[in-house]
Image (spheres, helix red, strand yellow):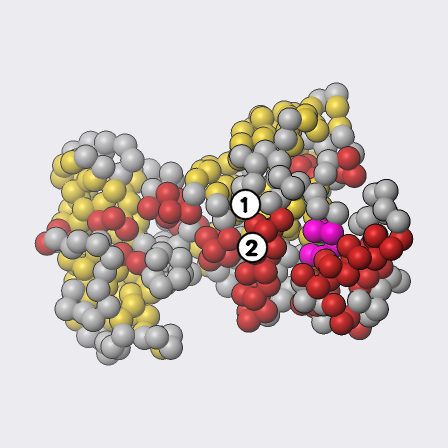
């Protein structure tokens, strides 16, 4: 079975005064695992519900494969879109067993009852639930219920699988295991997938392509590596994992990089567009780009003398493989500075910053954005308590 190409053209949707989707143009080839990443209220669910046919767009078109399924005068109902959806709350029928729930997805297929039973059994086997087919949802754990929902999604072999934060009700350990299963099952099936999350680590782990949404707009569509190394905007940089940011002035622009003066230090940082000499910039620093200059952790890539800043250790957190430090530098704070050996609080340290993990953006006057993973909200704040994925996670 082959997946479908997915295409949005100028997709718009309003709820009263709220623009949930604002001219979204997006196209991914057949078989792509697309993850939609964005803070709460950015329009992820609306986009996926419109793709599923549960919501109608006000403007624009949606194409699934070579079919237009949504345009101003045409709305193909969900059951005719060759897709299946997995929801955050599992959405199982409480009066049907696991096998009954999975079999429900085959009700429109022209299969004999024996053929349907075989398909259900195989789907339940693939999600590791062969022995629990006769249990009702209330007799299953959250993880098992989500596996039933996954089996129900794949049993009819649709060309498109939609996932709306399917792991958010599960605990960390189970999330990780089920994430791997979703990735494997989807890719084995050949279906295309669109997966919503506000968790950047989940997005980076799953995606072929990530679409970042902000206030109903698609602000970047790229593979994880490009998104991480070349974020299009400060918002994208922030939302995909930052150690922190420092303000500076451009000394010169060389190729893809700007040489900046940050306090008494010189830092090189990537910049997509040439920056004028003397202009004010914010240098946004990935966790993977940080390390102690005298350290044991090393930093990814070459470090030259433009990449050293000094600061004071203000916090140390044990992380199993080593320690994450928070270091105050000039008027900025860098978090998730990893080292196998701990530094003591109050110690004066030198940090080496890899230019390939630093991005410079013009300073436009707005307050820096900080992404707090705990509350999964983006807020304006001058003091970063930036939640970050450390270097052995997202960045490698
Ligand atoms: N049925 C509705 N009626 C009114 N406003 C809505 C409705 N559905 C969504 N919205 C609004 O549209 C905007 C986008 O919502 P949407 O649920 O698509 O965002 P999201 O990125 O999926 O958020 P979350 O991560 O919290 O689920 C939000 O401002 C939301 O309040």
In the image, 169: left or right of 274? right
- Asked if the stretch drawn in magenta spans residue 94, the answer is no
Is 82 rendered above or below residue 117?
above
- Asked if the stretch drawn in magenta spans residue 154, the answer is yes
In the image, 71: left or right of 300? right
Residue toward you, 262 or 49:
49
Residue 183 is marked as: 2
Magenta-tinted stretch:
149-155
Residue at horizontal 38%, vertical 38%? 232
Which quadrant would residue 370 be assigned to in this image? bottom left
Furthest residue toward top: 73
**Where residue 122 appears, x then y in whole percent?**
73, 59
**Where residue 190 appears, x then y in whole percent?**
60, 45
Residue toward you, 54 or 252:
54
| SS label for mark 2 | helix
Magenta segment, principal secondary structure?
helix
Q: Quadrant of the N terminus?
A: top right
Residue at horizontal 16%, vertical 42%? 259
**Where residue 32 appears, x then y in whole percent?**
54, 41
Is 330 rendered above or below residue 315?
above
Q: Earlier in the sequence, mark 2 or mark 1?
A: 1
Rounded to the nearest whole Å, what is the CA distance between mark 2 and mark 1?
8 Å
In the picture of the structure, the residue carrying the numbered disc 1 is 33
Q: Using the rendered image of the protein, determine whether residue 282 is visible from the camera's viewpoint.
A: no
Residue at horizontal 83%, vertical 43%? 109
Residue 237 is marked as: none
Q: Quadrant of the C terminus?
A: bottom left
Residue toward you, 101 or 234:
101
Residue toward you, 133 or 219:
133
Q: Using the rendered image of the protein, determine whether residue 288 is visible from the camera's viewpoint.
A: yes
Quarter of the displayed picture in which ligand 1 can be seen: top right
């Amino acid at each position: 079975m082959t997946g479908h190409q997915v295409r949005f053209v100028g997709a718009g949707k309003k709820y009263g005064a709220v623009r949930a989707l604002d001219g979204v143009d997006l196209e991914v080839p057949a078989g792509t695992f697309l993850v939609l990443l964005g803070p709460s209220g950015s329009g992820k669910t609306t986009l996926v519900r419109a793709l599923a046919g549960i919501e109608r767009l006000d403007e624009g078109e949606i194409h699934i494969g070579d079919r237009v399924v949504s345009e101003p005068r045409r709305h193909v109902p969900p059951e005719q879109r060759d897709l299946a959806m997995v929801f955050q709350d599992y959405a199982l029928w409480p009066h049907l067993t696991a096998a009954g729930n999975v079999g429900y997805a085959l009700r429109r297929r022209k299969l004999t009852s024996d053929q349907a039973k075989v398909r259900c059994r195989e789907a339940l086997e693939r999600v590791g639930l062969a022995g629990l087919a006769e249990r009702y949802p209330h007799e299953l754990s959250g993880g098992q219920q989500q596996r039933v929902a996954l089996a129900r999604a794949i049993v009819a072999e649709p060309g498109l699988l939609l996932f709306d934060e399917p792991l958010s009700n599960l605990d960390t350990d189970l999330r990780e295991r089920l994430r791997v299963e979703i990735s494997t099952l989807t890719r084995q099936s050949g279906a295309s997938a669109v997966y919503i999350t506000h968790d950047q680590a989940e997005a980076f782990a799953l995606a072929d392509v990530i679409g970042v949404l902000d206030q109903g707009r698609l602000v970047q569509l790229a593979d994880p590596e490009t998104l991480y190394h070349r974020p299009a905007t400060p918002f994208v940089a922030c939302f995909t994992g930052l150690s922190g940011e420092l303000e500076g002035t451009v000394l010169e622009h060389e190729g893809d990089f700007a040489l900046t003066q940050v306090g008494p230090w010189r830092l090189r940082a990537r910049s997509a567009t040439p920056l004028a000499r003397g202009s004010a910039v914010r240098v946004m620093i990935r966790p993977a780009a940080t390390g102690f200059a005298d350290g044991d952790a090393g930093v990814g890539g070459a470090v030259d003398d433009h990449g050293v800043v000094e600061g004071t250790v203000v916090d140390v957190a044990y992380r199993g493989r080593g320690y994450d430090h928070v270091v105050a530098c000039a008027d900025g704070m860098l978090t998730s500075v990893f080292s196998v050996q701990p530094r003591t609080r109050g110690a004066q340290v030198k940090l080496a910053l890899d230019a390939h993990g630093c991005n410079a953006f013009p300073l436009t006057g707005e307050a820096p954005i900080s992404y707090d993973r705990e509350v999964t909200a983006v807020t304006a704040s001058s003091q970063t308590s930036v939640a970050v994925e450390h270097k052995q996670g997202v960045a490698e």
